[in-house]
Image (tube, rainbow, N blue to C red):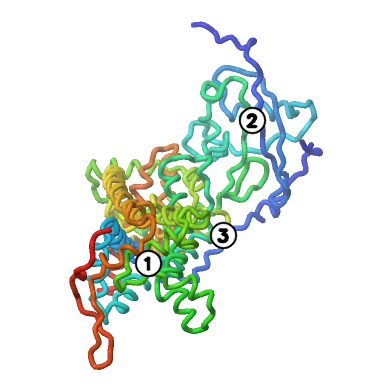
Amino acid sequence: MSTLSPASPVSDSEITTASPIAYSEPLGRRHFWLRRLHSLLGLLFGGYVVVHLLVNATGLWPRAYQQNVDKIHSLQPMLPLIEIATIFIPLLFHAIYGAYIASVGLKFNTTKYNYGGNVRYFLQRITAWVLLAFIAFHIATLHKWGFEAIYNMTHIDFFHRWGGMFNEHNQAFQSTVHGIRGFFNTENAMNPGNVLVMAFYLAGVWSACFHFANGLWTSAIAWGLTVTARSQKRWGDACLGFGVVVTLIGTMAWVAFTVAPAARGDVSRWDNYTRTTHEIQVDGQSIDVKGEPSNESTQP
Amino acid sequence: MTVPQTQNQPPIVFNIKRQDKPDSMPYWQTFSVPYRPNMNVTSVLQYISAYPQTAEGEKTAPINYDVACLEEVCGSCTMLINGVARQACSALIDQMRGEKGAEATITIEPMSKFPVVRDLIVDRTRMFENLKRIKGWIPVDGYYNLGAGPKIEPRKQDSLYALSRCMTCGCCLEACPQFTLENAFVGAQIFSQVRYFNMHPTGKVDADERMEVMMGDGGITDCGNAQNCVKVCPKEIPLTESIGWIGRKATVYAVKEFLVK
């Protein structure tokens, strides 16, 4: 407890030291366009994530999953272009600009004002950081443009060991299980490191579902689709329903590569069953041809 | 009519955050104020001004605070009472004791999103500067009598009246996680005023100029949709509807700018 000496008068000049805010506009109108682009690309990427989770939920049926992966990869040689345009550019812009706007001028106050909207505002930003870390890890370890690309440039073994774990060639299911359930140790799935990776995947999937569903709700206000409080409430209920459905699909996808019966134990026993292509040689070059599983294959 | 018994009521303990100068460190003092029926926080501050001594019995300077209308229409006595932004004049002690219990300490702080001038007085210039930036007025000045203004249908009058109740108290900004001392965000108060003047048949001659401010730094896209503003607004202004409205106008304005201008 500090005590106050007799009142010291405050002069006018001291009162005006409370400085008015300076209205510098380094971005000006660009600010508006960048923010709206951020919103639009978030919706685009969210749409991709829903498709991604739907395809991965078919991992509960490993052969169907392999066939779906084959369908996606049948877009070759345009697949990289599609990936760059609809996944990587939206993702990078949304993540980098989002990290910028979430780290400048923002003050959480959920303890004082614990209204639902404020809690969702808080969660939207927390899930953003979870997703930034998760998607970086997810791409680095599974995608061939992650650590594997660094390995190809540097030939440092570390990047080969932990990168490019996903293999779409007849190994879509097996390699995904290795990259998630068996990340650190394929022999013992309950290895603490594996459990941590699986937990990270669940956190990532749930964060994505919340972030997209809530983003659908806020973007409707931002773009001016929902103006009245009643329409915002109604659209909020719709987004909640959508979020629950997407979370269910996402959880199915997570289960498929972690604790589902097919993912347990030795996944190499799926090798024959999920084989959908035969490699044949034409003029000395290896090409893939759609094929039926070989006769000796049986469901494990 | 029975006179409430005041003798048996314990005194009320107030923890008040004080600050001598804009750049000096804040500190806390505790005051014990005898209970009287129907007290509000302003009357508590008046009591402390009359008897400026802390609960420990030490003499101190009277607390500096803003007050004017005493009926929740001017907004000047806005402060943090138990951590939440509201007007001191409408913060009734009996109500707070009913919610928190007779023995509960009540904390009083200056607003945290505006620079402190002294004790509970803050400098809310930023809100008035923003009103100037958006031309928060109806342009009717002229050299001759402009005659009667345009007629407004009653339903629109109702919408406009709801928006006109804003008293620039700053509760919406205090509660907003996007509004800080450091950034340039204008906040719900301004969005609602832009809507108010742009909806008005005479006010909308300046609509584009207001939209320019809305689409600049600190404008509509900086809203994070936490929607605390509408929850804390003492005048129950539909602030989140104003935000959606500005969002829609900005979308239309941007498309027009992109394709037409």
- Which one is in front, B130 or A290? A290
Q: Amino acid at mark 3?
A: Ile
**Residue drawn 36% across and 59% down?**
B142
Identify which residue, A217 or A256, lies in the foreground.
A256
- In the rendered image, residue B147, in percent from the top left (x then y), is placed at 28, 52
Asked whether, in this view, residue B260 is left or right of residue B220, the answer is left
Q: For marks 3 and 1, give the one nearer the viewer.
A: 1
Chain to which the residue tagged by mark 2 belongs: B
Query: What's the CA distance linking mark 2 and mark 3?
Result: 30 Å
Label 1 crowding class (10 Å Cα cut-off): few <14, some 14-19, many 20+? Answer: many
SS state under label 3: loop
Which amino acid does the dot numbered 1 rest on? Answer: Ser
Residue A155 located left or right of residue A178: right
Badge nearest the viewer, 2 or 1? 1
Task: Look at the picture and state if B2 lies above or below B43.
Answer: above
Tag 2 secondary structure: helix
Q: Callout 3: 10 Å neighbours few (<14), some, many (20+)?
A: some
Answer yes or no: do the residues labelled 3 and 1 have beta carbons within 8 Å?
no
Give the total of numbered labels. 3
Name above or below for residue A3 compared with residue A177. Answer: above
Q: Are marks 2 and 3 in contact (CB under 8 Å)?
A: no
The residue beneath circle 1 is A175
**Name of the residue lying farthest toward the top:** B1
Q: Mark 2 highlights which residue? A: B45
For marks 3 and 1, the one nearer the N-term is: 3
Residue A21, label in figure: 3
**Badge 1 sits on which subunit?**
A
